[in-house]
Image (spheres, rainbow, N blue to C red):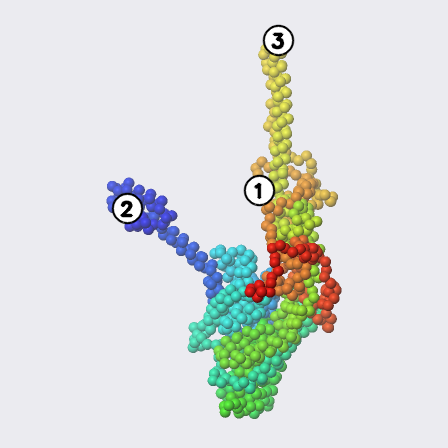
């Protein structure tokens, strides 16, 4: 039996009734009473079930659950994509190896398979989601900046990105997987958030795309960017650092645990699946190396690593410039551009044909290890054994796939030089194809080959090693390859985290010091010459992203907000009418409008979104409001008619009474009382047919076209709204009467009580410097800011004006482009402009406050 004290409080009332029922039925049922305990037991179980359900739902809504799911999904996706890519590559090699007796058929297979896959990838992506081309990191940088890109985080984009990426990488072209997976992980985060929105909580308002909490949106997307790289390289630490460096300008430390949790889960799942599939024995680094840990390098080798870093910086800047030059040259040629726009699949097919022909192994590919895939190339380049001794190749039989680097007629140095040069321009050309692809892995391969070349040169210069303190340090060219891979990829992306990524990729940290030295020098050289690859893509695609301020230009920016602000500000006053509101909404497409006290004072009171103002105007001119006016008018008419009928009935009764008296006084006639004629009940005024014919056309006079304007503004007409009328109300107003009613409504004063007003929009003063304005916009992700002077609205600065000012401040062809007012302010002869704030300050500057006392020198020291 259930003890009453154990029953929940919500069931106490019901338990009392059950106990009463048990006492009343004691003589009939005996001592068991099974039916009495059944109801409270069921209620107790249902209450426990509801509470458990609520607990599970609240648990699912937690951030760490979503992050774990994000890591699991992206890790499985990365492993599945690698499996599909490996199947395509093995199939191509199987067909190529089976036709070794006929070189022509081998060439057809070597060229046709990549062309088919690339063409399918380009066509499928173009049909399903054209925005899926490229890496996606430039777009993610723009989204994290606060700009909304439509159709970029949708399920169609997810499908197009996955299938297009598999086909593009399965072709064997020099393309990368890691950058597109940053976009794929962001798509997974957006779709997971939409699913979690079904459970409410932090993910309501239709998921990440429409979530009101912008900070939470940024946190989840930054974590997703870290996951995208971690699940490809099995590098959680490097993935988090890379996402911070590439995707966000300012990073909140509270997001660290989110990125590390999701990235660790994704990297672990990505490396666990091969063990579960029995492809590997245990979870290890993706490209495990075996460098010696005891005395890994000599200090005399550090200058060589420094030279490697400087050269990598030059190569990285040249790669970004070459890629941008190819894209711009194609766009500038109108004839070629129009032809390629009409034949979208022709360009990727021609690029694939060219690259495949040059890498054909029996042809020119034999001089550049053309038959090796990117993963096989990295494994051989990271080998810690020297390929040459005094410039002569020896003992390649133990390496296996490294045989592709050896040719009987040329040396290893020639092969490496040809590989670096050919892969350099091939990659810059291949990543311009309209397919989902990235440049991170090809750049790592090129950097590893260049580092291997430097390492082999060092091994040739010091064949017996470096002698120091009676010890001999043998040169390991693989270490130079690792440093070259990190340095070149860091130079192209302008990041330092590539050193951590390469360390996690190879599983060793023995050469972290020379690697970081090379990466830092490469970044210093590349950043002084060219923007990063992702910033270059932002410029090419003309995405609304705020560029960074260049080195050494901060003190030269003699530009202020007053030089770049828009002085003709669209605003509404506190006592404006709906007609003013209507004209302001039709004059522009601003997302928000400033609310000022009056046109004379211009005191800024707040900001109102455009949607709120449209709602106010639509409510003022709505059908329901017009029906209320008709109802009030009908009631007034009915009251007037009733007053008239009452007065008529009183007059009739008086006349009847007089006639009765006259008839009673006579003796001849019979008594007969005359009654007034019975009146029929009045038809309600709202149901009477209109006496005016409805015109077939809308009025064309200036006073009658406000309804048409409202229709064009809100895409609906008040007389066709699907609203249910009351049973005794009929809309009998003609279009002319409706237009007159709208004109009267537009002349009324706006009531802002039912409108959401932002009482504290972001404001700047007119003397705020450009550098500080750039920092504020980047930190807070602002779209615009109002410029005020002592509370008065004098202008507005939007993202567009700030971007133009920053781009105009950079030297272009030796000419410094600056706003006109900035030229009047030289550092030596700059005149202070008399604003109201300075006048006020000059007025009260000499007034000493009685509370303030001059601080003595001893007081300052004591403080």
Q: Percent position (x, y) of residue 393?
A: 55, 90
Q: Nearer the viewer, residue 621 or 554?
A: 554
Judge the density around disc 3: few (<14), some (14-19), many (≥20) Cα neighbours within 10 Å: few
Q: Residue 515, can we see it?
A: yes
Q: Residue under circle 3?
A: 666
Q: Residue under circle 2?
A: 33
Location of residue 795 with respect to 256 vertically, above or below = above
| Residue 72, disc | none
Location of residue 407 with respect to 686 vertically, above or below = below
| Residue 724, disc | 1
Location of residue 618 with respect to 500 vertically, above or below = above
Q: Which of the marked residues, 1 or 3, is nearer the chain's N terminus?
A: 3
Q: Is residue 222 left or right of residue 788?
A: left
Q: Which of the marked residues, 2 or 1, is nearer the chain's N terminus?
A: 2
Q: Residue at x 61, y 12 (%)?
A: 661
**In what quadrant of the picture does the C terminus appear?**
bottom right
Image-quadrant location for residue 106: bottom right
Q: Are marks 2 and 1 in contact (CB under 8 Å)?
A: no
Q: Residue at x 62, y 60 (%)?
A: 854
Q: Is residue 150 left or right of residue 586?
A: left
């Amino acid at each position: 039996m259930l003890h009453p004290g154990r029953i929940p409080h919500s069931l106490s009332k019901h338990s009392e009734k059950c106990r009463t029922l048990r006492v009343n039925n004691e003589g009939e049922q005996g001592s068991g009473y099974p039916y009495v305990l059944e109801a409270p037991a069921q209620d107790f179980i249902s209450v426990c079930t509801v509470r458990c359900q609520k607990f599970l739902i609240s648990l699912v809504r937690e951030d760490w659950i979503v992050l774990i799911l994000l890591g699991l999904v992206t890790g499985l996706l990365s492993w599945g994509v690698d499996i599909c890519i490996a199947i395509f590559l093995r199939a191509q090699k199987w067909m190529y190896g089976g036709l070794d007796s006929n070189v022509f058929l081998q060439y057809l297979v070597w060229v046709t398979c990549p062309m088919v896959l690339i063409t399918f990838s380009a066509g499928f992506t173009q049909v399903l989601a054209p925005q899926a081309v490229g890496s996606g990191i430039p777009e993610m940088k723009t989204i994290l900046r606060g700009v909304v890109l439509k159709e970029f985080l949708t399920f169609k984009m997810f499908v197009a990105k996955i299938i297009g990426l598999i086909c593009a990488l399965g072709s064997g072209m020099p393309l990368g997987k890691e950058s597109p997976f940053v976009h794929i992980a962001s798509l997974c985060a957006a779709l997971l958030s939409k699913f979690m929105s079904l459970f409410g909580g932090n993910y309501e308002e239709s998921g990440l795309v429409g979530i009101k909490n912008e900070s939470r949106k940024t946190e989840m997307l930054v974590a997703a960017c870290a996951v995208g790289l971690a699940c490809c390289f099995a590098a959680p630490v490097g993935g988090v650092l890379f996402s911070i460096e590439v995707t966000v300008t300012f990073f909140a430390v509270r997001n660290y645990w989110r990125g590390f949790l999701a990235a660790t889960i994704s990297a672990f799942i990505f490396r666990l699946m091969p063990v579960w599939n029995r492809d590997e024995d245990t979870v290890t680094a993706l490209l495990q190396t075996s460098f010696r840990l005891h005395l890994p390098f000599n200090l005399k080798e550090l200058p060589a690593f420094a030279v490697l870093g400087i050269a990598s910086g030059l190569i990285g800047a040249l790669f970004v410039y070459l890629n941008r030059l190819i894209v711009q040259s194609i766009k500038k040629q109108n004839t070629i551009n129009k032809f390629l726009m009409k034949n979208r699949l022709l360009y990727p097919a021609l690029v694939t044909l060219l690259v495949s022909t040059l890498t054909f192994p029996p042809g020119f590919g034999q001089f550049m290890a053309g038959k090796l895939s990117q993963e096989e190339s990295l494994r051989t380049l990271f080998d810690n054994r020297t390929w040459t001794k005094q410039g002569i190749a020896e003992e390649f039989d133990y390496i296996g796939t490294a045989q592709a680097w050896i040719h009987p007629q040329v040396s290893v140095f020639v092969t490496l030089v040809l590989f670096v040069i050919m892969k350099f321009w091939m990659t810059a050309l291949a990543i311009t194809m309209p397919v989902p692809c990235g440049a991170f892995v090809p750049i790592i391969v090129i950097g590893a080959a260049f580092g291997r070349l430097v390492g082999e040169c060092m091994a040739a210069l010091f064949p017996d090693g470096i002698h120091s303190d009676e010890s001999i340090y043998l040169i390991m060219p693989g270490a130079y390859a690792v440093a070259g891979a990190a340095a070149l990829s860091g130079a192209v992306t302008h990041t330092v985290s590539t050193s951590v990524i390469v360390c996690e990729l190879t599983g060793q940290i023995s050469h972290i010091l020379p690697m970081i030295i090379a990466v830092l020098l490469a970044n210093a050289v590349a950043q002084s010459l060219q923007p990063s690859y992702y910033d270059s893509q932002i410029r090419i695609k003309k995405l609304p992203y705020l560029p960074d301020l260049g080195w050494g230009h901060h003190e030269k920016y003699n530009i202020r907000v007053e030089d770049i602000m828009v002085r003709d500000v669209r605003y509404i006053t506190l006592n404006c009418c709906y007609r003013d509101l209507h004209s302001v909404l039709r004059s522009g497409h601003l997302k928000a409008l400033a609310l000022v006290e009056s046109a004379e004072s211009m005191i800024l009171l707040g900001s109102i979104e455009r949607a709120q103002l449209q709602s106010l105007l639509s409510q003022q001119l709505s059908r329901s409001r017009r029906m209320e006016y008709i109802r009030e008018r009908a009631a007034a008419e009915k009251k007037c008619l009733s007053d008239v009928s009452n007065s008529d009935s009183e007059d009739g009764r008086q006349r009847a009474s007089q006639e009765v008296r006259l008839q009673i006084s006579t003796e001849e006639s019979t008594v007969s009382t005359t009654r007034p004629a019975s009146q029929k009940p009045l038809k309600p005024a709202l149901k009477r047919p209109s006496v005016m014919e409805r015109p077939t056309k809308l009025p064309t006079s200036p006073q009658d076209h406000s309804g048409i304007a409202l229709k064009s503004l809100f895409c609906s007409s008040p007389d066709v709204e699907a609203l249910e009328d009351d049973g005794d109300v009929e809309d009998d107003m003609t279009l002319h009467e409706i237009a007159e009613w709208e004109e009267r409504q537009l002349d009324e004063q706006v009531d802002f009580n039912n409108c959401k007003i932002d009482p504290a929009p972001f404001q700047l003063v007119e003397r705020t410097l450009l550098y500080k304005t750039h920092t504020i916009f980047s930190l807070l992700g602002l779209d615009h800011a109002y410029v005020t002077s002592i509370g008065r609205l004098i202008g507005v600065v939007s993202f567009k004006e700030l971007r133009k000012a920053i781009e105009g401040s950079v030297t272009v062809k030796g000419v410094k482009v600056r706003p006109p007012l900035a030229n009047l302010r030289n550092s030596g002869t700059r005149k202070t402009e008399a604003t109201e704030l300075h006048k006020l300050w000059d007025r009260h500057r000499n007034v000493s406050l009685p509370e303030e006392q001059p601080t003595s020198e001893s007081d300052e020291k004591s403080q």
